[in-house]
Structure formats: C-alpha cells, structure tokens
Amino acid sequence: MVGAGEMGHGIAEVLALAGLRVSLVDVKQEILDRAMARIADSLRRLASRGRIGPEQVDQILSRISTHTSIAEGARGADLAIEAVPERLDVKSQVLRELEAALPPEAIIGTNTSGILISELAQFLSRRDRFLGTHFFNPPAVMKLVEVVVGPETSEAAVNSVMEFLRAAGKVPVRVKDSVGFVVNRIEGPELLYFCLLADRGVAAPQEVDAFFRSQGLPMGPYELMDYVGLDVVHDILQYFASRLSRDYGKCRTIGELVSRGQLGMKSGRGFYEWSGGKAKIDLSRQTDKVSLMDVMLLEVNEAVKLLEEGVASPDDIETAVKLGLNRPFGPISVAKSVTSSEARERLEALAREFDCSVFAPARSIVEGRLRDAVEGRLAPSPAQRAPAPAQAQAPPAQSSGPSPYGEYKYLRVSRAGDRVLRIALNRPKLNLINPELLDELGSVLDRVRDDPEVFVVLITGEGGVLSAGADLSTFVADPVQFSEFSRKGERVFRKIVELPKVTVAEIKGYALGGGLELALACDIRLSTPDAVLGFPEVTLGILPGWGGTQRLPRLIGMSRAMEMILTGRRITGKEAHEIGLVASLLGGDPDGEAISYANSIATTSAPIAARFAKMLVNKASEVPEDVGLEMESAAFGILFSTQDMKEGVSALLSKRKPVFRGR
Ligand code: NAI
C-alpha cells in the first residue's frame, strides 16, 4: 500500500483485517507512525464494539509493516495499490518505481478518483496488469470499490482483483475507464444544480437543506458540500468542465467561497458556520422551490448516459450509488417508476431554466427508451462510447421490450419505445391469418384504445414477412364460417381504422390478400423495396373480403385498384411506393427502421391533433366536402383549448422542441 494518508491507512487496515500481510509505504516514518496509530485506534474501536476479539488488535497490527522505500515495500508483493496525492507527477513517479520493484506477475491498482486509467497506464509497460481500485472514504466502513478497467487491462487481472476484494468483504463493481467513473459522475449534475441554485438565489441554502432533511436525507446538499470540502467540490466541477461539458464551470458561488478560504467544515466556514462542529439549520423554514424528484431525475439522466456509454451495467450503477452515497435506492430503481416522456419533459424544463446542457435529457430518454436503457437493452456501439450529445435525435433501432398486455398465441406484442406498441403477427407459414389470430388482434386493439401510454401502434410480422393472407384452410369447407370469417376480419380491421392512435404497417416479404388489407387499414405504410404486394383473390374465385375493394381505390385511384384486384398482378414495395400506396421505403434493417419511424412520430407529433387529423382524413372520402370542412373547423376549435397547442406554439416561438402530453 503506497501512501499512508487519509485513504491509504484505511485501505491497509481493510486488507490486514482480511488476513493479508501488508507493506505500508510513505515518504516519512512520522507519517507511517501516525497512520499506524490511526489504524490501531480504529481496531480498538472495532474490538470495543465486539466486531473483533481484543486479542486480534495486535495480531492484525503485526501483519502491517512500514517502509519509506517503495523498492523495499514492494518486494515479493502480489498486489500493490497506490493512494498518493491526486497529482500526475507524483503518481507517475510512484507507478514507475512500483513496476520496477514488483514481481512481473503482480497487479497494480490505483485509488485515483479522477485521473483516467488510460492516462496513468502510459507510465507503465505491463498495462494489462494495471487497473483502478477506487475505494470510498472511510475505506474501513464503505463497502464499495469501483474496479476501473482500462483499455489494456486484462480480464484475468480484473477477475482476480474482483475476487480478492470480495474476499476482503468489499462489494466491487466493474466500471469502464471514463471521466468520474460511476458515483462521482452520477453526483456531478446535482452538485452543479445546487451550485446554480445558490448562484441565482432561487432559495437560501439553509431552506433547501431544511427541505431535503424533511425528506429523510441525513444531510442537506449544502451541508454535505461543506462536509466534503468546497475545494474538493470545486475541483470536481472544474475537472468535469474540462472533460465533460463547459457548463460544469458555470457556477460562481463555490469558486468565490473557495477563494475567500471558506472551504467548509475543515476551515470552520463554508455555506455554514461550523464553529460548534455542526451546521445550524432552522428546520422549520423549508423552501418550496425545489423538488426531490428533480434531483432524482438528474441522477437517472446521468445513469442513462453511463449506460449509453457502456460504462457499467444497470445493476452495478444501482449498487454503486446505493453503497457509495449511502442511499436506500439508486437511479435505476427510480427510473422504473417514471416514463421517458415525464423524464424528458422535466429535464428539458431544467435545461431551459438553468440554460445548462448538462441537464438536457440523454438520447435514450428523448427516444422514449428509458425503460430499455435501465433494463439493460441498449447495445453500446463504439460511437456511443463517447459521451452522447444530449439533444441527439437519432431514432432507435433496437429490439423491443416485453409484452405489456401478456402473452398471445399468434401475436408478439411489445413496447418498442416509450409510446409505441409493436404488434407482430406470429404464425407458421408466412403469418397466414386465421380466426384466432383475428380474435387476438381484436382484443389487443380494444386494450390499446384506452391505453394512455401508447400513441403509435406498429403492425408487422415475425419471420421477415407481414402476411401472405388469410389462412384458407380454415374456412373453405364451410360456407357459413366463410362469411363469418369475412365479417370478423372486417370488424377487426375497422378497429384499426378507428383507433384513436397513429397506426403504421411495416410491409416486408409478402403482403398478399388479407395481409395487404391489414396494411391498408393502417394510417401509414412502410415497405422494403423487394416486398411483394397483391390481391390474388379473383384468381382463386373469391374477392378481397376485408375491405380491400373499398380501401385500395381510395388510396391509389380506381384505375390502378381495378388492375390490381381484377388481374391479381403483384407489385413490389418499390412500385407501391411510386404509386403512393407505401409512404416510405425501408432499408437493410426494416424492423429497426420501422421502430425508429414509429418513435419519431411518437416524439414529434401531438397526440390529440394527430387523432383528429386521422379521423378527418378518413372521413374525407365518406362525407361531402362541405361537411368535411365543417368537421375540420370544429376539430380546429377543439384543439385550441389543448395544452399541446399552447406548448407547440410557445416552443415554435422560443425555437425549441415541443414536449406534447396528449392533453
Ligand atoms: P492524502 O494526502 O491524505 O495521502 C497521500 C499520502 O501519500 C500522504 O501521506 C503522502 O505523504 C503520501 N505520498 C506522497 N508522495 C509519495 C511517494 N512518492 N511515495 C509514497 N507516499 C507518498 O491523500 P488521500 O486523500 O488519501 O488521497 C489519495 C488518493 O486517493 C488520491 O488519488 C485521491 O484522489 C484518492 N481518493 C481520495 C478520497 C478521499 O476522500 N480522500 C476518496 C477516494 C479516492
């Protein structure tokens, strides 16, 4: 253990308590003696509380030897950890000396809280055996250790250090080398938020602290900053300003306090007077200008950014925040109780209010994929490993979430975004539609009609095909069933037309007969260029019985509809696009692109406006023009009273993206 200061003496104690022999190294014997005295005090306290036997105090102390030379202390060690001051010149010198003195197979850990492992690794030649072992203060009490994996660290080194830490009674979490690792990074935005609150005088620090104490926190945020040291907080913010976002450098108050020597508890004064050893807070005077949820959302947002960057798994982020910040729950469990749109709306409001991009929602939240993110369904691409631009609008193209409506025999129903429901036909033999599938589809449509969480419904098929049509084998034997089957299809497809949501059909493989009629009932059709579309019914002695004869001519005109229906001619997706039957063509990842398309509607269109517009467009071919125009004016008037309209207009005027709530 190199460095016997605040952290080093504590880590040495932890390791000796776990039964290991420890060489503790520092520059002067007095420092080492002071460290040993602190360890002895701590062990005696443990003995007085019965955590160790009294006879163990001396045994444990005897396992620690002290040295003023790295060459001597490192001899024969399996693992070395450095906890020397957070300065590159000091750390580089210590790392070089350590590598020269240690056996070649030894592992080196650094307790750095801010410097990247990749930056420190350049001072070493055996970089595969170098990683971060970030203990929390005080090491004897705090269970968390962030094990920071550098770009060249070997799996073998990571695994043996994780195992070693577990054996020493710690809870290691695996973290990818990145600015602030997990815990400091999650705390960053809220530190900035409280600093900006203080700058703007939104509420007095005492009143904010009184509020947070009333919410059950052991310390308010300003009290905590004073306790940690305002110089430390200032350093973190400056470091983040240089590495993550210049907005971290925006706050004035902390810098002013630090330059006046008001460093918090250690200097006797910071936000508070600490002469009595305690901050005096009048708990009866609480502000109502801040909300606990805002702070939680800032943590959730930063956690999502870490997930997008592939820094740690959801479980590890949750564990790190709980143990590193002494919380009963972490941002991942909080995220499960909010929707993407709620988080997005509030974070955008905070970003606007404080003119601060750090608070802007992470990409996955904007795309409606908060749930996917916190349930570990983001696959970080190399591009995503760089910090995500907060306002990026790239749509998602990933797999969809679990079924919100339970399981079906012939359908796969899943969430494919915050307000998108994906319904995929799932039958053998090209998704042929049988009566049971229609029943299932009808029941999903009945449920989705009243589901306020869903705004766009995407209808598609599994197995690279939408559907090759009705399953004729189910009804050819019985004329009564035949007619009932036709009615059932019409009824179910009518539900799609009348659904107060935007419906999108993804055509791929085949959309023949009933499969094409299913697509025709949707508001928007997307298709792969090589998909095959057609109505083969007349060539089988029947006719399109689920609305095809009525809906196709309205979409492409009588002439072309007649040709398709009377000859059974099949067309490709590309031709269908040229004649306006298909709105957009899909590329190499049709499922992903269709999901992205649906999500882009869900995040940009106002739900009530879209719902009225859909109804009016559908009525256009059914009612005389003057009646249609009258209905249009009436709908226009109704929209005037919606919150969405106010939001849309005010966003336009202030040149920002609107956030629609469907109200
Ligand atoms: P500290 O200043 O209390 O201790 C550093 C020790 O290193 C001193 O005793 C110093 O004499 C010794 N040292 C300096 N040069 C040396 C050399 N060439 N060879 C051997 N020993 C040398 O610092 P602290 O707070 O223990 O921090 C150490 C590291 O741990 C830093 O990287 C810091 O960022 C990190 N850390 C600190 C935390 C804290 O709360 N203090 C929490 C987590 C990480």
Image (tube, rainbow, N blue to C red):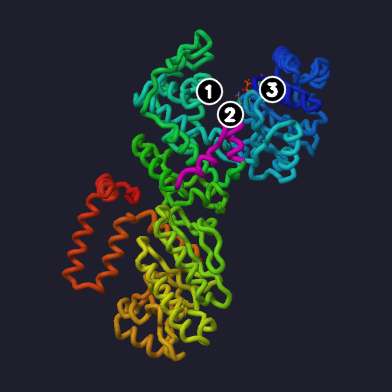
| Displayed quadrant of residue 361 | top left
Residue 320 is one of the magenta-drawn residues = yes
Q: Which residue is mark 1?
A: 218
Q: Is residue 72 above or below residue 397?
A: above
Residue 241 at x, y percent in the picture = 46, 34
Residue 159 at x, y percent in the picture = 73, 42
At a point 36% along the width and 40% down the height, the residue shown is 349
Residue 262 showing in the rendered view: yes
Q: Is residue 426 above or below residue 662?
A: below
Q: Is residue 86 left or right of residue 17?
A: left
At a point 35% along the width and 82% down the height, the residue shown is 549
Q: Which residue type carries mark 1?
A: Pro
Verify CB contact (< 8 Å) between mark 1 and mark 2: yes
Q: Which residue type carries mark 3?
A: Gly
Circle nearer the N terminus (1, 2):
1
CA gap, disc 3 to disc 2?
18 Å
CA gap, disc 3 to disc 1?
24 Å
Q: Which residue is mark 2?
A: 326
Q: Taking the image as four quarters, which one is ligand 1 found in?
A: top right
Q: Is residue 642 above or below residue 255?
A: below
Verify CB contact (< 8 Å) between mark 3 and mark 2: no
Q: Which residue is mark 3?
A: 10
Circle nearer the N terminus (3, 2):
3
Residue 415 is one of the magenta-drawn residues = no
Q: Nearer the viewer, residue 538 or 70?
A: 538
- Residues in magenta? 316-339
| Displayed quadrant of residue 496 | bottom left
Residue 208 at x, y percent in the picture = 41, 24
Label 2 residue near ligand 1, CB within 8 Å? no
Disc 3: CA contacts within 10 A as few (<14), some (14-19) or many (>=20): many
